[in-house]
Amino acid sequence: MSMTTSSSQGHQLKLPVIGRGNADSIAFSPDHQFMAVGRKRVEIWDMRHLKAGERYPSPLYRLGELATPIKAMRFVDANTLETIAEDGTFRWNLCTGEKIQ
């Protein structure tokens, strides 16, 4: 399973989607540098370093697994991602990839 998006340079990129099926939530950082794709786990992609034609690039981070699918997520600031799922709301430090709460 994959999804197509555009890089900050305007290139079309085909990215693998984690898990089985489609992503439940996608969020972009305010500066469009990072894209978060989530289902029960979140992958963070650095949009500046993705190259057109690159078949399956690796994400910058894979954040920990949650018990239920992510319903929504947002970038709180340049270093923090907030995810909302049935099992709770969590914040993640994007510098370390660790759960804050």
Image (cartoon, rainbow, N blue to C red):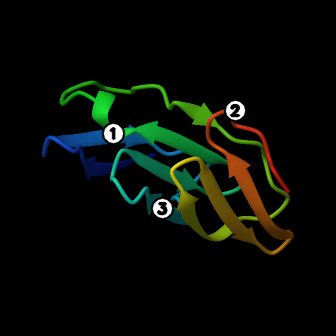
CA distance for labels 2 and 3: 20 Å
Q: What is the quadrant of the C terminus in the image?
A: bottom right
Q: Secondary structure at mark 1?
A: helix
On screen, residue 29 above or below 61: below
Crowd band around label 2 with a 10 angstrom C-alpha radius: few (<14), some (14–19), many (20+):
few
Residue in front for this viewpoint, 11 or 78: 78
Q: How many marks?
A: 3
Q: Secondary structure at mark 2?
A: loop
- Does the CB distance between marks 2 and 1 fall below 8 Å? no
Label of residue 26 in the image:
3
Residue in front for this viewpoint, 95 or 28: 95
> Can the viewer see residue 94?
yes
Which one is earlier in the sequence, the residue at label 2 or at label 1? Answer: 1
Label of residue 96 in the image:
2
Residue at 29% from the left image edge and 34% from the top image edge: 48
Which one is earlier in the sequence, the residue at label 2 or at label 3? Answer: 3
The amino acid marked with disc number 3 is Ile
On screen, residue 51 above or below 94: above
Label of residue 86 in the image:
none
Provide the residue designation for mark 1.
Answer: 47
Residue at 50% from the left image edge and 32% from the top image edge: 59
Residue at 42% from the left image edge and 46% from the top image edge: 34
Front: mark 1 or 3: 1
Residue in front for this viewpoint, 4 or 47: 47
> Can the viewer see residue 18?
no
CA distance for labels 1 and 3: 13 Å
